[in-house]
Image (tube, rainbow, N blue to C red):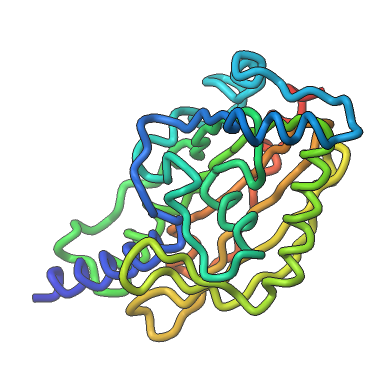
Amino acid sequence: MKRSSGIRLCATVAVGALSLALITGCSDGGSDTAKSADAKSSAEGTTKNSAKALSAAELQKLALVKGDVAGYEVGSVGKTYPATKSAVTVDKAQCRPLAWAMAGQAPGDAATATNRLVTEAKKTSATPSKSVEDLSEEEFEDAFGSALDRTTTVVGLSSYDGDGAEKTFKAVSDAVKSCAGGFTLLPGSDGTKYTGVAAEKASDTGDESVAFGASAVMEDTGGKTGTVHTEVVRHGSTLVTYYTVNLGALMSQKAYAIPAAVVTAQSAKLK
């Protein structure tokens, strides 16, 4: 009975934390999107900025690949995150740029976009002195949380024509303030309710950057709140979004942040 109850408790906490990871749809192994011809034509006809968006091929070359970040695994987002922006529905229109960034999608009307999943390599741990069945409830929960204690970051790249990158960045920056009271994602019957959005210290990379944390009450945890972290950085006509979650840290209520190594590696490829 001791173990089954522990498994149920930890599984529930993990599922509650996972709800913070915006599991709102299925992906076919990464999302590469293009703006519609009509929207592109409109942007080209009205913008006074002659900047051109990067092509899909050019953007792919700038995305992180295996070996770019020491201590981290780089791969496809798989089916964990939405394949398209249309799969991300928000109750407040002004908060859409934040939700899109948190889903690894372009936060605005991009000409091209792609993303990658960057996961901290598994940490080596000492062999436990007890078997799983001999662990107390508290010891089991600690061990379970430690096994999940590594950051996962969705790195999204999106490129824009004209002044699209600047306008999109401003929309994100404005949303951090206007969405301070939170917003609700509506992938299911109840949705994921973020109770608050707060500005955080940005990396100051690129031409301009903004960072924020979004908090929500995790399910079946006695009211415990978990915070996920996002940063948006503009490099010329290209935006990079970093969305980071650490399930082990959420479960143990420990602080964590967007890995500096990931930001540094991606920024270097955009210089």
Q: Position of residue 223 (x, y in %)?
A: 44, 84
Horizontal side of residue 262 vs 15, given as left or right: right
Instruction: Classify the position of the C terminus by image quarter.
Output: top right
Q: Nearer the viewer, residue 42 or 177?
A: 42
Q: How many marks?
A: 0
Residue shown at the point (30%, 53%) measured from the top left: 128
Horizontal side of residue 108 vs 218, given as left or right: right
Residue shown at the point (60%, 32%) measured from the top left: 35
Q: Nearer the viewer, residue 196 or 172?
A: 172
Horizontal side of residue 240 vs 224, given as left or right: right
- Please determine whether, in this image, residue 138 is positioned above or below residue 259: below
Instruction: Classify the position of the N terminus by image quarter.
Output: bottom left
Residue shown at the point (55%, 21%) measured from the top left: 65
Q: Nearer the viewer, residue 151 or 109?
A: 109
Evaluate whether residue 114 shows in this view.
Answer: yes
Q: Residue furthest bottom?
A: 222
Q: Nearer the viewer, residue 179 or 254?
A: 179
Q: Position of residue 227 (x, y in %)?
A: 56, 67
Q: Position of residue 193 (x, y in %)?
A: 48, 74
Horizontal side of residue 121 vs 50, given as left or right: left
Q: Position of residue 118 (x, y in %)?
A: 52, 36
Evaluate whether residue 264 shows in this view.
Answer: no
Q: Quadrant of residue 42?
A: top right
Residue shown at the point (85%, 35%) measured from the top left: 47
Q: Residue furthest right?
A: 48
